[in-house]
Image (tube, rainbow, N blue to C red):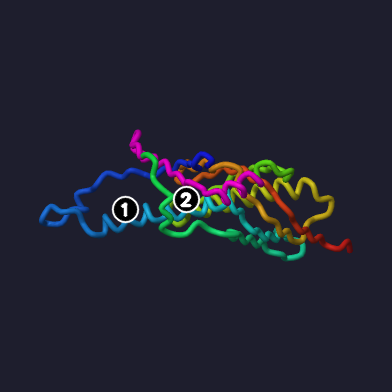
Amino acid sequence: MAEALRGEFQLLSEPIEISALDTSGELDRDYFELEEGAINEMVDDARWIFSGMIYGYEVAWIPPFRARAVEEKFEIELVAQISAGDERLKTFSIDRIDGMIYVLMEYASDFTQDKRLEAWRISPFPYASGEGRSPILGGSRREALEMAIKEAIKKHFVGREFNRPKSIQTRVALVDFPQIGFNNGEYRALVGIRIGLNSVLHYKID
């Protein structure tokens, strides 16, 4: 059995305000719901990331082309996903440092999943990296991750295609657990991916 996959999340640690207490001195229900929502989102993101390392993502990207009034379109879907409630997905440690909470998650992949991981790691598929951002208010950690993957794909294909690509369809996998943090009111994600088989359509030369 291979070593468990691990990755760290950062959560904002906000002090409990007086307004979070009702007249009896007990914590307000809304406060607990807010905390539970942040935890559930983190667990869902962990499933999405670990699944992207094991199974990969199907990606379709239409680059913007202002001269032809073409708007950008980006779609990303997991090939397969770790099921909700999988007991092999666990919290390894929790630390509170300087107003931040650091949560280390781990996933114990099985034999078949280990083979998938190994296939991505030893394959000749090219490597690319990218960075993505999303506002903390109104955005999400997932959005920052998706933007980082899109940026990695853009850097790889745009630099190699002689003619402007009309659309790109490909399968990618995360090489390692992404670096995810906060910066100036934004989620910030750094990813490294392997780019698998792909289909690239080009505009016809007028």
Residue drawn at point x = 41 percent, y = 53 percent: 87
Say which element carries label 1. Answer: helix
129 on left or right of 34 = right
Q: Front-most of 80 and 150?
A: 80
In the picture of the structure, the residue carrying the numbered disc 1 is 35
Image quarter of residue 94: top left
Cβ atoms under marks 2 and 1 closer than 8 Å: no
Estimate how packed mark 1 is, as few (under 14), some (14 to 19) or many (20 or more) residues with alpha carbons within 10 Å: few
Percent position of residue 194, x then y: 67, 46
**Residue 100 counted in the magenta span:** yes
| Separation (CA) of disc 2 from disc 1 | 17 Å
Q: Nearer the viewer, residue 176 or 180?
A: 176
Instruction: Say few, some or many: other residues with alpha carbon within 10 Å of mark 2 (under 14 / 14 to 19 / 20 or more).
Output: many
Q: Which residues are magenta?
A: 94-119
**Which residue position is annotated with label 2?**
46
In the picture as drawn, the residue positioned furthest to the top comes out as 98
Seen as rendered, the residue at the extreme left is 24
Residue kind at label 1, given as amino acid type: Glu
Residue 63 in picture, x, y percent from top left:
71, 58
The residue lying at 21 percent from left, 57 percent from top is: 28
